[in-house]
Amino acid sequence: MLEIFTMATATLTSKGQITIPVQVRTALGLETGDRVEFVETEDGKFSIIAASKTVHDLKGLIQKPARAVSIDDMNRAIAAQGAKAG
């Protein structure tokens, strides 16, 4: 089955700049000041990746556990999962 993608275009200025089309900015969740990376995926082809989030932006994303977990508890849980997999 052939997958159809919408295509957006931009024009390169004499200074090497482009304006990222609004539908692309929206799809990537980009806002003013965000960074993007251009990643080569195949010979002559690139993907645009939103690179605006830092490790510090992740703070508060995951809630603290209801109770602290000890290293021994973690090791037991890892060993139990390993035994199930083996």
Image (cartoon, rainbow, N blue to C red):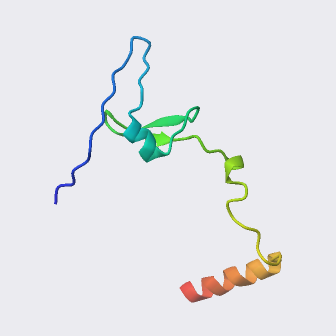
Q: Residue at x 61, y 82 (%)?
A: 82
Q: Residue at x 34, y 27 (%)?
A: 10
- Residue 35 visible somewhere in the drawing: yes
Q: Position of residue 34 (x, y in %)?
A: 57, 36
- Residue 86 visible somewhere in the drawing: no
Decide which of 11, 16 is in the foreground and name it.
11
The quarter holding residue 69 reads bottom right
Task: Give the left or right position of residue 46, taking residue 56 as reference.
Answer: left
Q: Residue furthest top?
A: 14
Decide which of 79, 55 is in the foreground and name it.
55
Q: Position of residue 20 (x, y in %)?
A: 41, 31
Q: Position of residue 33 (x, y in %)?
A: 59, 32
Task: Give the left or right position of residue 13, taking residue 78 as reference.
Answer: left
Q: Residue at x 44, y 39 (%)?
A: 25
Q: Position of residue 37 (x, y in %)?
A: 49, 36
Q: Residue at x 42, y 46 (%)?
A: 27
Decide which of 44, 79 is in the foreground and name it.
44
The quarter holding residue 22 reads top left
The quarter holding residue 31 reads top right
Quadrant of the drawing holding the N terminus: bottom left
Q: Is residue 69 above or below residue 83?
A: above
**Total numbered circles:** 0
Q: Is residue 13 above or below residue 10?
A: above
Task: Give the left or right position of residue 11, taking residue 70 as reference.
Answer: left
Quadrant of the drawing holding the C terminus: bottom right
Q: Residue furthest left?
A: 1
